[in-house]
Amino acid sequence: MGSVLKILAAAFLWSTIGVAASLGREYLWIAFIRSLTAALTALAAGARPGRGALLPGLLLGGLFSAYPVAAIYAGVGNAAYLLYTAPLWTTLALALWGERPSRRDVSGVALVLVAVVLMASSGRISTVGFAAGLASGFFYGLYIAVARRLASGGRVVDASLGAMPYTLAVTAPALLLKPGPPTPEAVAAGVYLGVFGTVLPYRLFASAVSTVGGARASVLASLEPVLAALWGVLLFSQVPTSLEAVAYVLITAAAVVASRK
């Protein structure tokens, strides 16, 4: 498989995360089973979680927990685009670490902020879904910032597969809020997300990004929310409003702007 096709395949798989979460419904069990499956797969692949993998693992655990809630309560497409508010949080985190934002960073943040206001003004997204979507973008944005700093120091494993076991520190305690066993649908959704929503697309993306280049790879991967919105329309009749559609365009533009750095 060519490098471009690998990235497109990764984007396709990531776009199905909200679909699986919506079908599984029990988001706490889905998050835990996804973490467990990804952790076991990473350990089987030889990854050994070091101390440096703790923070990215906790951030991914937050992402695993928040995103299914957003998909269920905000809709598949809205959840995917709220996740892509990540450049806002990445820029803010790196600024706090002393990295001065570029004009492109500021432009991307401005586009994201306008998009968030438009989505909040649409009047159709529930408060829970909207908050969970922003939380998923927050966790993902901070994870990107942390992973970037780790990778620049040669600690790629800590930023990726090594972080997977630590996601359980977030998703496992959350099960205290959900008594009773999971449904078969939740188990299937969690296992699917652990393999096809986490480990496999990461491997595809990571194996291709060095050939394609980070900027181009990020642009290609931005196909993910577009496909997610399409699945929402086709599978759940979640047709975006005009304000949501404009917000989608702005967030996609912000992702492209951020990727050019």
Image: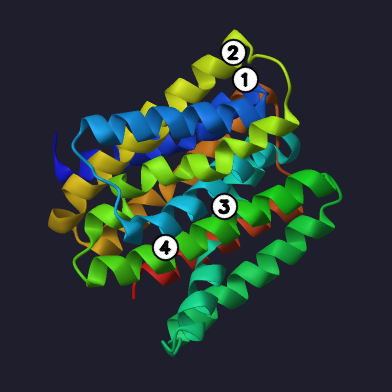
What secondary structure is found at the residue carrying circle 2? helix
Whichever of callouts 2 and 4 sits on the residue coming sooner in the sequence is 4
Asked whether disc 1 touches disc 3, contact meaning CB atoms under 8 Å apart, the reply is: no
Q: Which residue is mark 1?
A: 23
Residue 72, percent across and down? 70, 33
**What residue lies at 15% left-to-right and 57% top-to-bottom?**
210
User: In the image, which disc is placed on residue 225?
Assistant: none
In the picture, residue 215 is in which quadrant?
bottom left
Q: Which residue is at the front of the view, 91 or 93?
A: 93
Q: Name the residue type under label 2.
A: Glu
Q: CA distance from mark 4 to mark 1?
A: 28 Å
Q: Which residue is mark 4?
A: 144
Q: Residues within 10 Å of mark 4 (few under 14, many from 20)?
A: many
Mark 2 and 4 residues: CB-CB less than 8 Å, in contact?
A: no
Q: Give the residue type at disc 1.
A: Leu
**Numbered circle sitting on residue 83:** 3
Instruction: Give how far apart the Cα atoms at labels 1 and 3 are.
Output: 19 Å
